[in-house]
Amino acid sequence: MTKLCLRPEDAAPILGKSPSNIRRDMRRGVLDLGLVIPPEKSGKATWEFRIYPAKVEKIIGESLEEFYARRSRTGETDKNGRGGQGDGSGK
């Protein structure tokens, strides 16, 4: 089942970018993946990022399910050596 929103840490290995680069590019309006909510609007101490899976899927040209299945089949890993879907914790 696809999540309603992803975190930058979830989208980073899919897009081949670091979470900090995703946050920076979204704040600047360079990367349109969803909502960017500044602290003064959310009432929280930090920026919030709501990344829509459909926007990530449009960029990568396949569904997230297909992406994770392909990675599992081919043994692809991200830069930290993790393969498959993982827990998205970034650890």
Image (cartoon, rainbow, N blue to C red):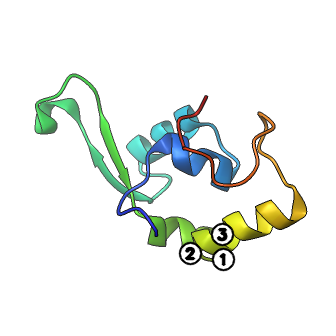
Which residue corresponds to mark 2? Answer: 58
Kindly identify the residue that appears in the image at 12 percent across and 38 percent down.
41
Q: Nearer the viewer, residue 44 or 77?
A: 77
Tell me which corner region of the image, top left, top right, bottom left or bottom right, holds residue 52: bottom left
Q: CA distance from mark 3 to mark 1?
A: 4 Å
Residue 60 got which mark? 3
Q: Are marks 3 and 1 in contact (CB under 8 Å)?
A: yes
| 25 on left or right of 61 | left
Q: Residue furthest right?
A: 74
Look at label 2 and name its amino acid. Answer: Lys
Could you tell me residue 30's position as x and y percent? 49, 52
Q: Amino acid at mark 1?
A: Gly
Amino acid type at circle 3 is Ile
Q: Residue at x 44, y 59 (%)?
A: 33
- Label 3 Cα neighbours within 10 Å, binned few <14 / some 14-19 / many ≥20: few
Quadrant where the image shows the C terminus: top right
* Residue 9 vertical placement versus 71 (above, below): above
- Please say if the residues under marks 2 and 1 sit with CB atoms less than 8 Å apart: yes
Residue at the spot x=66%, y=69% of the render?
A: 60
Is 8 left, or right, of 36 in this rendering? right
Image marks 2 and 3: residues in contact by CB distance under 8 Å = yes
In the figure, is residue 66 to the left or right of 54?
right
| 83 in relation to 44, above or below | below
Residue position marked by numbered label 1 in the rendering: 61
